Image: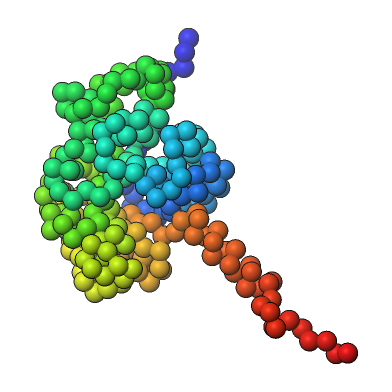
Amino acid sequence: MPVRINSDPSFRDALVSADRPLSGMWVCSGSPLVAEICAGAGLDWLLIDAEHSPNGLEGILAQLQAVRGYPVTAVVRPPVNDAVIIKQYLDLGAQSLLIPMVHTADEAAAAVSATRYPPLGVRGVGSALARSARWNRIPDYLAHASETITVVVQIESAQAVDNVAEILAVDGIDAVFIGPSDLAASMGVLGQQEHPDVVAAVEHCINAAKAAGKPVGVNAFAEATARRYLAAGVDFILVGADVALLARGGEALAAKYVQAPGTGPTSSY
């Protein structure tokens, strides 16, 4: 007899059951080994990124498999809000998606539709072939699939900030996540995530999410910024990235042990 199993909890379940903000990190290396190392760090969630990282379908699958045995929730970010790509990610077994560059309520609704089977959406039916349903070993997967999926949309433009209340009102949007880097760029202050106008826009979105009763998250690598947004009431946050930790850690080692020309010990002879 085949093994009958249930779907894993998704990010929505983790947010509902949490009694504190959930802290996570980006996984951008494309390496299942690095993803597994990050999964055991003690953080609450990992964002496996395919928008700005070398992650294809096979790599995302391997990372989902690598982290599944750890007490951490995997969220996957596709490169674009596209129904075909979202279908492929869901069939791989990704249950929690962070959809980038969602600027309007219509775009948010399209993201939700891509995660629902007809008549509620446009997701293609391939559960017998897919890890999402464990090749039809999850009972009644087609009927209950939407209950196992979390849809988070990313607010990262001035247009999205203007439309945040309408985006939050879209049925099926489980949470919003604010990206200050692209937001700053769209506001004409590229690279200035700490600009007062950017901070005000982020806090406006946090307040809108609170008013709508939906979870809100933010990206903040600088500790002071992270603490500010945690105090403002975010429910989840990204505070680092695998590649950034490796880059900064390597630089710190070089600073300790590699001597610049002319700074080495002088000879006494």
Q: Residue at x 25, y 56 (%)?
A: 156
Q: Residue furthest top?
A: 1
Residue 190: percent from left, percent from top:
30, 67
Q: Is residue 37 left or right of residue 5?
A: right
Residue 60: percent from left, percent from top:
45, 37
Q: Residue at x 35, y 30 (%)?
A: 88
Q: Is residue 249 above or below residue 137?
A: below
The front one of 64 and 21 is: 64
Residue 48: percent from left, percent from top:
42, 45
The front one of 187 and 168 is: 187
Q: Residue at x 37, y 42 (%)?
A: 76
Report the number of discs.
Answer: 0
Indicate the quadrant where residue 56 lies: top left
Q: Residue at x 63, y 67 (%)?
A: 253
Q: Residue furthest right?
A: 269
Q: Is residue 133 visible?
A: yes
Residue 21: percent from left, percent from top:
34, 56
* Quadrant (top left, top right, bottom left, bottom right) of the C terminus: bottom right
Indicate the quadrant where residue 155 lies: bottom left
Q: Is residue 247 above or below residue 108?
A: below
The image's colouring method is rainbow
